[in-house]
Image (spheres, helix red, strand yellow):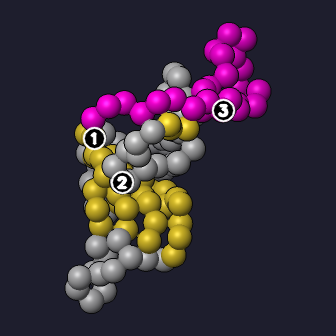
Amino acid sequence: MRPLALDDFAGIAFRYATNRHYYLFALTGGTQARLAVRQPIDKTLRVAEWRELASAPFTYDTKSYYKVVLWDRERVWIYTQDGPAPRGRLYAPVRNPHYNDSNYRAHVSWPRWVDAPAR
């Protein structure tokens, strides 16, 4: 991803339900990365209503390309959850092992169910 300007946001829309309800990962203002969800009902006419899910400081410029990678050492994240964590058993897929890792192999996740942590 390469942002073309610093005065607004550059990002990726995903889990697109309608033009009024989707998730957005964006770089904003040259200093921040954020994850937000567009609310389906606007409070003011033609003013988008957003709910911030997460943000972090991230300095970027318009001359560089940035790679967006969504995984951690244990799992491949295939969706986002914007509500409270469910009780009972959770689906938590496991990443395949890192030995003999390569850029040219398929990355898959193995199914696994775990007990939800107590609140």
**Residues tagged 2 and 1 counted as in contact (Cβ below 8 A):** no
Task: Residue 4 in the image: state x and y as whole percent.
Answer: 43, 57
Outermost residue on the front side: it is 88
Report the disc number at residue 95: none
Quadrant of the drawing holding the C terminus:
top left
Residues at marks 2 and 3, CA–CA distance in whole angstroms: 22 Å
The residues colored magenta run: 93-119
Label 2 or label 1, whichever comes before in sequence order: 1
Task: Tell me the crowding category of disc 2: few under 14, some 14 to 19, or many 20 or more residues within 10 angstroms, Cα based.
Answer: few
In the image, what residue occupies the spot 46% across and 49% down?
Answer: 80
> What's under tag 1, amino acid-wise?
Ala
Q: Is residue 20 magenta?
A: no
Label 1 or label 3, whichever comes before in sequence order: 1
Report the disc number at residue 83: 2
Report the disc number at residue 111: 3
Residue mark closest to the camera, 2 vs 1? 2
Label 2 or label 3, whichever comes before in sequence order: 2
Q: Magenta region, mostly helix, strand or loop?
A: loop
In the image, what residue occupies the spot 43% across and 77% down?
Answer: 20
Q: Is residue 110 above or below residue 8?
A: above
Q: Is residue 87 left or right of residue 71?
A: left
Residue 59: quadrant of the picture: top left
Q: Is residue 116 magenta?
A: yes
Report the disc number at residue 56: 1
